Amino acid sequence: QKEVEQDPGPLSVPEGAIVSLNCTYSNSAFQYFMWYRQYSRKGPELLMYTYSSGNKEDGRFTAQVDKSSKYISLFIRDSQPSDSATYLCAMSAVPGNTPLVFGKGTRLSVIA
Amino acid sequence: IAGITQAPTSQILAAGRRMTLRCTQDMRHNAMYWYRQDLGLGLRLIHYSNTAGTTGKGEVPDGYSVSRANTDDFPLTLASAVPSQTSVYFCASSPQGGGPYEQYFGPGTRLTVT
């Protein structure tokens, strides 16, 4: 089992839908959780960052972390065609110079 | 312009040839990384460097080498390219290695080995 599992999709939704993207992980030492967005033929860019458990909201985006279940989610409300991209989760343990561990990414298409 | 630059943007390379992918950052970040991204396999870490003068192996280091002579540059060398090294290569940097630090990615190099 890989440390981080993410359904690759593709996921296709109509404009305005609520999107739920998820990752599970096996390493209980992970404390920092990130979501990156990658547009086609571009490098990934940080979208959301959370520490430990709980929720974080930024506009239409909400990141949730459930450490007891080793499960993280990214919700997109009122999805737009401009949200069409690949979303990658990433996580790391407490500071120790260990690089981030990435999920494989979920490709999302929002259809107008 | 602050950020990470990669060169070349794309390259077609004959198998057996040597190739160096260049990566430069101007953010004075301590840590730098090289990833390859393949359809269905996601981002896979090749090599990383937590500070100038040190390097470490990632998930898929075979066939690749790196050096970190200074803070800004982190070249990736394919000593003798093989078709399985056809991929999109991303360089990234972060203020420190590991922990809570965001990684900033370059635009990528598309490499085709024939």
Image: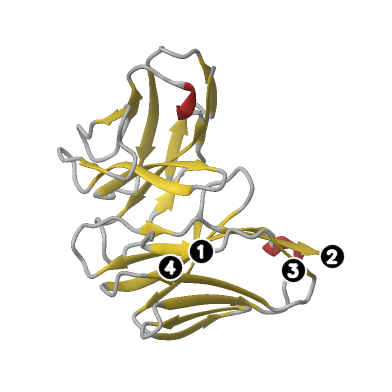
Q: Which of the numbered marks, if any, corresponds to residue A112? A: 2
The answer as to whether the residues below labels 3 and 4 share one chain is yes
Chain containing mark 3: A
Foreground: disc 1 or disc 3:
1
Chain containing mark 1: A
* Place of residue B113 in the rendered image (x, y in percent of width and height, measured from the top left): 51, 21
Q: Earlier in the sequence, mark 2 or mark 3?
A: 3
Q: Say few, some or many: other residues with alpha carbon within 10 Å of mark 1 (under 14 / 14 to 19 / 20 or more).
A: many
Q: Which of the numbered marks, if any, corresponds to residue B64? A: none
**Element at label 3:** loop
Q: CA distance from mark 1 to mark 2?
A: 26 Å
Q: Which of the numbered marks, if any, corresponds to residue A34? A: 4
Q: Earlier in the sequence, mark 3 or mark 4?
A: 4
Foreground: disc 1 or disc 4:
1
Q: Say few, some or many: other residues with alpha carbon within 10 Å of mark 3 (under 14 / 14 to 19 / 20 or more).
A: some
Q: Earlier in the sequence, mark 1 or mark 3?
A: 1
Q: Is residue A35 left or right of residue B63?
A: right
